Image (cartoon, rainbow, N blue to C red):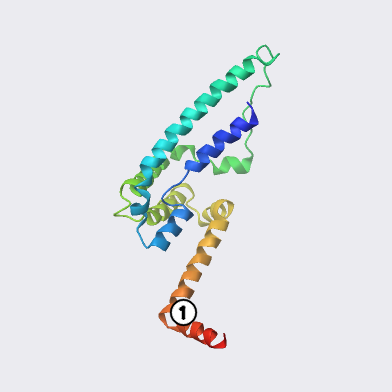
Amino acid sequence: IDRRILACAASMAAGVNFLPWTGPMIRASAALKLPIPEIFSPLVPVQAVGLVFIFAVSYWLGLREERRLAHVPGAAGAAPGPAATARILSDAERTLRRPDRFWINLVLTAAVLGTMVFLAEKVPPALMFMLGTALALVINYPQVDAQRQRIDAHARAAILMASILLAAGVFTGIMQGTGMLRAMAQTAVTFV
């Protein structure tokens, strides 16, 4: 496949990847002082149309690429490439697998996503995501050390950013609530 076509299909899909629990949606909600469902719900039909468009364009590009490859000398009768083989997992990777917990994880995922999408007006999506993450960690990795390793492996930067944002919010709230922010601004104005 032509790399440009692959890049086109991937970038179109990334352009529609806008969920109610992403950073931009949360920032827009905070800036507009509106609940997330009120902002996100009108975007669902737009996303559905975008998804249909992406599938249609990707199908068309695939047909076009198929025709192009049919006219490339040697492409139709070329020897097949090496067969894909299953990757051998290391012992550390094997210990992380949880195939016996597939169904409970599927039910948990469906419940969390269903609540986040369909009951977002009653239950805050961020709360459901946090509860779902905590339950998934407890179900799949009952030992605290294993939970910490999984968090460090996949969410260290996100947790650091969340703690920074929480601290900044607390600091700003204290500064504004006590009147220190206004006093500092007025003092700065007197120097100007």
Q: Nearer the viewer, residue 38 or 143?
A: 38
> In this orientation, which residue lies closer to the viewer: 32 or 117?
32
Residue most extreme to the front: 192
- Where residue 68 appears, as percent x and y from the top left, is 62, 19
Q: Is residue 61 above or below residue 161?
A: above
Say if 76 sits above or below 17 in the image. Answer: above
**Left or right position of 58 against 106:** right
Report the residue at 52% width, 87% height from top: 187
Q: Looking at this view, is 148 or 142 the one in front?
A: 148
In this rendering, position of residue 102 left or right of residue 92: left
Q: Residue at x 43, y 75 (%)?
A: 173
Total residue callouts? 1
Q: Position of residue 100 (x, y in %)?
A: 46, 38
Rendering coords of residue 101 (x, y %)? 44, 40
- What is the x, y in percent for residue 106? 41, 39
Q: Quadrant of residue 111?
A: top left
Indicate the quadrant containing the N terminus: top left, top right, bottom left or bottom right. top right
Q: Amino acid at mark 1?
A: Met
Does the rendering let one see residue 25?
A: yes
Residue 79: tell me if it is visible: no
Residue furthest left in the image: 122
Q: Residue at x 40, y 58 (%)?
A: 29
- In the rendered image, the quadrant that contains the C terminus is bottom right
Q: Which image quadrant is residue 85 in?
A: top right
The kind of secondary structure element at disc 1 is helix
Q: What residue is disc 1 on? A: 175
